[in-house]
Amino acid sequence: MQKTTNRPVIIEWRDGQPYSSLFQDVYFSSDNGALETEYVFLQGNNLAKRWFELHSNHFVIAETGFGSGLNFICAAKLWLATAPKEATLHFISTERYPLSLQDITAALQPWSELHEFSAPLIASYESICNGEPVNMLYGNRVQLSLLIGDAAESLQALVVTDDRINLVYPKIDAWFLDGFSPAKNPDMWQPALFEQMARLSKQESTFATFTCAGVVRKGLLAAGFEVTKQAGFGKKREMLFGRFTGHTNATVVSMMDL
Ligand SMILES: C[S@@+](CC[C@H](N)C(=O)[O-])C[C@H]1O[C@@H](n2cnc3c(N)ncnc32)[C@H](O)[C@@H]1O
């Protein structure tokens, strides 16, 4: 496993899009990263409906692989449009190889329709990466915690007491499983990650991921998630979404032939 450092990772740019030399993989779909986020992570977790009907003052998302923050700002935009004004979105993300301020700024630049959401993130990005624990953004309606380090290790360090995480927020409502393809980043997609997901999930917590790799399907099933397969975004044939039940004897449901 590679070491985590506080130094920003060095990346390449291919056709104006960020590309990881370390993992030989893209940060988001070359078809359209923002539409991919909407299809895979926002719709995959049914967030618009859940937030429109929210009867709580908190909703907690956890993500593996913050990258450019595109998933974060798309989620924040939807939250502001659909959730009750008094509720707070807690967005916990993990990142082992943070982008530099210059690269995250360039990566988010093409999404002009998202500039009002990317600008506050970029303005706070360096203090967020330096471990600022509570970052309130968008009129204090969204709280971002970026945990620098390996996803499973960072999640393992979160303490659960009386169904609250670090005494601050409730357990996780929805997971964004990002983090480069399992074939290119096998270190991250390990049973330890799925076990932490189970430990930190609320009953009925949901997840969505762009991949349908066997190691992910099997890992999630073994950790007590119900797993459904559906058509993927763009060139990807399949993706997965599902929910936490705590039962480890489920099988994969397929929506591919419906
Ligand atoms: C495909 S990119 C994520 C894209 C991102 N969600 C976005 O909105 O731009 C994958 C990210 O996972 C990070 N990553 C890779 N291995 C990791 C690990 N073991 N723990 C945490 N993050 C990891 C990479 O550094 C990279 O930023």
Image: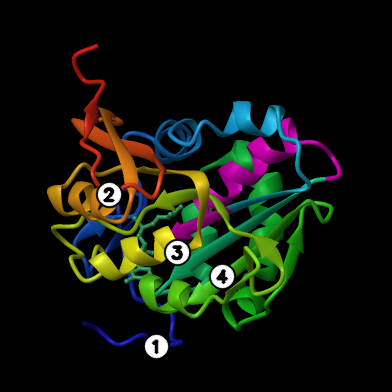
Decide if residue 29 is in sight here.
no
Secondary element at image label 3: helix
Under mark 1, the amino acid is Thr
Mark 1–mark 3 Cα distance, whole angstroms, equals 27 Å
Q: In which quarter of the image is the C terminus?
A: top left
Quarter occupied by residue 13:
bottom left
Which of discs 3 and 4 lies nearer the camera? The answer is 3
In the shown orientation, is residue 257 left or right of residue 146?
Answer: left
Q: Residue 199 carries which label?
A: 3
Reading the image, the residue beneath label 4 is: 146
Under mark 3, the amino acid is Arg
Ligand 1 quadrant in view: bottom left
Any magenta on residue 83?
yes
In terms of sequence position, does the residue under pointer 3 or pointer 4 come before the other?
4
Q: Which mark is residue 5?
A: 1
Give the residues drawn in magenta, as a range.
61-86
In the shown orientation, is residue 137 left or right of residue 145?
Answer: right
Mark 2–mark 1 Cα distance, whole angstroms, equals 36 Å
Q: Which mark is residue 248?
A: 2
Under mark 2, the amino acid is Thr
Which of discs 3 and 2 lies nearer the camera? The answer is 2
Which of discs 4 and 1 lies nearer the camera? The answer is 4
Mark 4–mark 1 Cα distance, whole angstroms, equals 15 Å
Residue neighbourhood size for the residue with mark 2, other residues' Cα within 10 Å, grouped as few (<14), some (14–19), many (≥20): some
Under mark 4, the amino acid is Leu
Which of discs 2 and 4 lies nearer the camera? The answer is 2
Secondary element at image label 4: strand
Residue 113 placement (x, y as % from top left): 62, 36
Residue neighbourhood size for the residue with mark 3, other residues' Cα within 10 Å, grouped as few (<14), some (14–19), many (≥20): some
